[in-house]
Amino acid sequence: MILAYGVSWSLLLIGSEMSNQKHVIEIVPPEYQQIREEYEFVNYQCPVCNGQGHFLPCQVGHDEWETTECDYCGGSGRVKAKIEIKWSPDYDSTIYNIE
């Protein structure tokens, strides 16, 4: 488990037919006055093209084949997640004294 700037995450590999990459985020307010935090999780297989970056070639003419690039991953076969946390005062829950 990695702890950085008030947020911790860990990589869990679940055993099944194929390995899955999962990140668990524990959100904890930072001890200093940091308003914004950004995290980036990379190297996920594209769920649309299954990591191929394109789709199967289609015949467009006699001996002419054309592949279609995946729009979701831009042809890379990989996608990433960008997570942004913005801290602000919580005026709504102060009446409930939530801790």
Image (cartoon, helix red, strand yellow):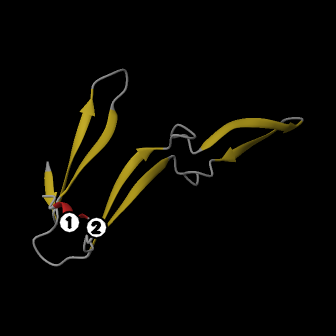
| Residue hosting label 2 | 92
In the picture shown, does residue 43 fall above or below 87?
A: above
Q: Nearer the viewer, residue 24 or 40?
A: 24
- Disc 1 secondary structure class: helix
- Occupied quadrant, residue 55: top right
Asked if the residues shown at circle 1 and circle 2 are in contact, with their CB atoms under 8 angstroms apart, the answer is yes
In the picture shown, does residue 21 fall above or below 95?
A: above
- Occupied quadrant, residue 82: bottom left
- Occupied quadrant, residue 97: bottom left
Determine the residue located farthest toward the front in the rendered image: 95
Q: Is residue 4 left or right of residue 73?
A: left
Q: Is residue 21 left or right of residue 74?
A: left
Query: Label 2 neighbourhood size at 10 Å, few (<14), some (14-19), many (20+)?
Result: few
- Disc 2 secondary structure class: loop
Q: Amino acid at mark 1?
A: Ile
Residue 1: x percent and y percent? 14, 48
Q: Is residue 58 left or right of residue 70?
A: right
| Residue hosting label 1 | 95
In the picture shown, does residue 11 fall above or below 86?
A: above
- Residue pictured at 50% horizontal, 44% vertical: 46
